[in-house]
Amino acid sequence: MKNEFKMCALALVLAGGAMAGTLAPAGQTPARKAPAPKSQAESDALKTMFQAATPDAQIAAAEDFVVKFPQSDYKALAYLGEAQSYQQKNDYDHLVVAGEQALESDPDDGTKVQTLLILARAIAIKTGEFDLDREEKLTKVEKYAGTAIEMLRTMPKPNPALPDAQWEAAKADLTGQGHEALGLDQMVRKDYDKAIVEFKAASETPNADPSFGVRLAAAYDKAGKYDEAVAACDKVLAAANLHPMVKRAAEAEKAQALKLKSSTAPVAAKP
């Protein structure tokens, strides 16, 4: 299983540390102080947290870290890692709790963007059509995803040594996640045309996750645009090294589109 905490959060915080230590240009708000462990014990606890091999181990290490080091510069990161671990466990309720705690812990921009995106997606997925607090949840999805997308538009390269192409690819990937969350939001609202716009934006980002294309096809299906749904699935299925789970989902969505198209086709009159 992909270790989201190590692959995403750690990479951004290391880059963010370089950014935080730079001086702001004249007339601008000074950059925040570079994060750093305040003791060897904190440094060792960070290492334990980053090296945890399973989601449960990561959660335990993160909880232990924030209890022992409540004033740490990495407190928000610990909560983000905990949220990502709960995501791997499909435990959305605890994910939201950890994500909200990360936002309350003065996160740096990189950590904040990731937290906003993971929360937006999780809340959208878990919001039902008849939830009494549906509007409150969807408003939060739109706020979180919209804020993340807006931040990414102007976020400076976190580390001068980071190649421009790599930074732009990272921003595009995160922006795609934001549009996916907004698409999920519109699916709950049953505004399928708006969902199509968001999923299309997500699927057209460079190196977009193929699952975005499957979501786009589902939105086309709901909108009664079956030829477009089939085309979206064909595009996904043509991708190299497609994950078997995504492949099955695309095949199922294509079959659904063809079935719906057939059922709505006019019947030819008998001679």
Image: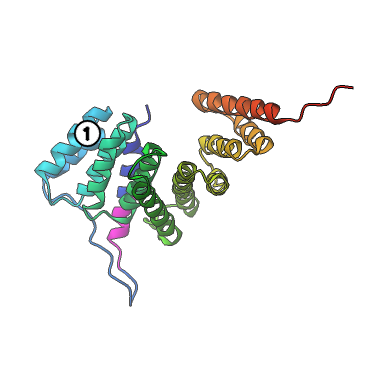
Magenta stretch: includes residue 252: no
Q: Is residue 26 visible?
A: yes
Main secondary structure type of the part rendered in magenta: helix
Residue 255 position, x and y percent, is 62, 24
- Give left or right: position of 60 versus 229: left
Residue 17 position, x and y percent, is 28, 54
According to the picture, the residue beneath numbered tag 1 turns out to be 59
Quadrant placement of the N terminus = top left
| Residue displayed at 65% across by 25% down | 259
Q: 38 and 72: which one is in front?
A: 72
Q: Which class describes the residues within 10 Å of circle 1: few (<14), some (14-19), or many (20+)?
A: many
Secondary structure of the residue carrying tag 1 is: helix
Decide: is 4 above or below 153: above
What is the three-letter code of the residue carrying label 1?
Ile
Q: 264 and 242: which one is in front?
A: 264
Q: Which residues are magenta?
A: 15-23
Magenta stretch: includes residue 17: yes
| Residue displayed at 40% across by 42% down | 124
